Image: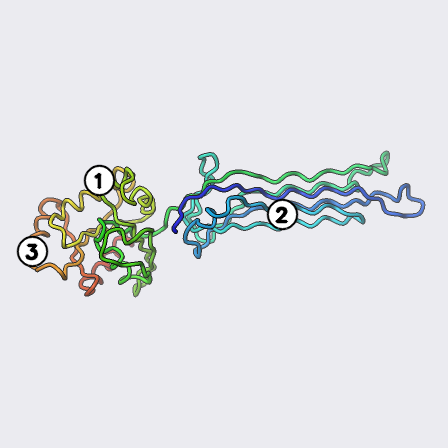
Amino acid sequence: MFIDEAEIYIKAGKGGDGAVSFRREKYVPKGGPDGGDGGDGGDILLIADNHCHGLAQYNRQKQFLAPNGGNGMGARKKGKDGQDLVLLVPPGTLIYNNDKLLYDMVEENKSVVIAKGGNGGWGNSHFATSIKQAPIWSKQGLPGDGMKLKLELKTIADVGLVGLPNAGKSTLLSVVSNARPKIANYPFTTLQPNLGTIKNIDMNIIIADIPGLIEGASQGKGLGDKFLKHIERTKIILHLISAESEDFVHDYDVIRKELEEFSPKLAKKKDLIAITKIEIIPEEILNERVALFVKKSKKKPLLISAVTSKNVDNLIGVIKEKIAKR
């Protein structure tokens, strides 16, 4: 199950306590103080890892505690520092605390210390003076940072595929990229965003297949409200319209309306339009529908067939050109 939101509690390690200790040495009162310092508590780090594809692990485990530092010992021996705890998140994860955005883990391998471990306390060897040569006190270690976090994933991709259910998005993704999404001839085959890298070109282009949208998606109908946010980061939007549809303009307008109502940013993004599945419609009927679409929308779509690969290379070339101009 694809999870793109989670709430967790994190707590960095407490610093170890300083030691009260005295060395045993002849002619030195009480042997002299030699209590060592406590070790520092472990930090908690977040790292954006490209091998992570969701937040499911943080839906299963809600609490993460870094190890405490060890207590100081005699002979000025410092306690062991607590080991840092590393939490991996997918690139594109937003980190919130009390609705305040702390970090946007947009870059792969980005690393941040989200919670700092407490400092270890000083041993009594630090407190010896000419007046108090045998201090019997030390300092306790400080507590580590602790907080509740909300994690929200927004997929990072160059191209976002959108369209009504059964528009052919998953089929196209499987043809142009290394992705292998589930493909079937019924609505809502895709239940989570799928990512792929377009093949056979001299630049890496990440393409995301967003689950099929329906009218009212921005208000929560179907799966749209859950996944529309995953195309907010894309550079361009590729609208796919099935050639089987009797009204290309209606299909395009439905998707455009949902994007605009969900986010003004989406409405302003550059877009491409492709008519898919052209292999199953008689050419005369296809030409009539395309002509009507061009007349009403003032936009010229590309005509492709993912099954036969017709014009797919042309589509990739146009995508590459538009991204290069950004």
Q: Nearer the viewer, residue 295 or 141?
A: 141
Q: Label 3: how many residues lie within 10 Å, few (<14), some (14-19) or many (20+)?
A: few
CA gap, disc 1 to disc 3? 27 Å
Comparing 79 with 295, the one in front is 79
To which residue does mark 2 refer?
67
Instruction: Please state the horizontal and vertical placement of residue 59, each as a whole percent of the image.
Output: 46, 46
Q: For this rendering, which residue is in front, 197 or 225?
A: 225
Left or right: residue 322 compared with residue 107: left
Mark closer to the chain start, 1 or 2: 2
Is residue 283 something that shows in the picture?
A: yes
Mark 1 or 3, nearer chain start: 1
* Above or below, comparing residue 16 to residue 175 in the picture: above
According to the picture, the residue beneath numbered tag 3 turns out to be 285
Res. 257 mark: 1
Is 321 drawn above or below residue 223 in the view shown? below
Residue 182 position in % (x across, y down): 30, 58
Residue at mark 3 to residue at mark 2: CA–CA distance: 68 Å
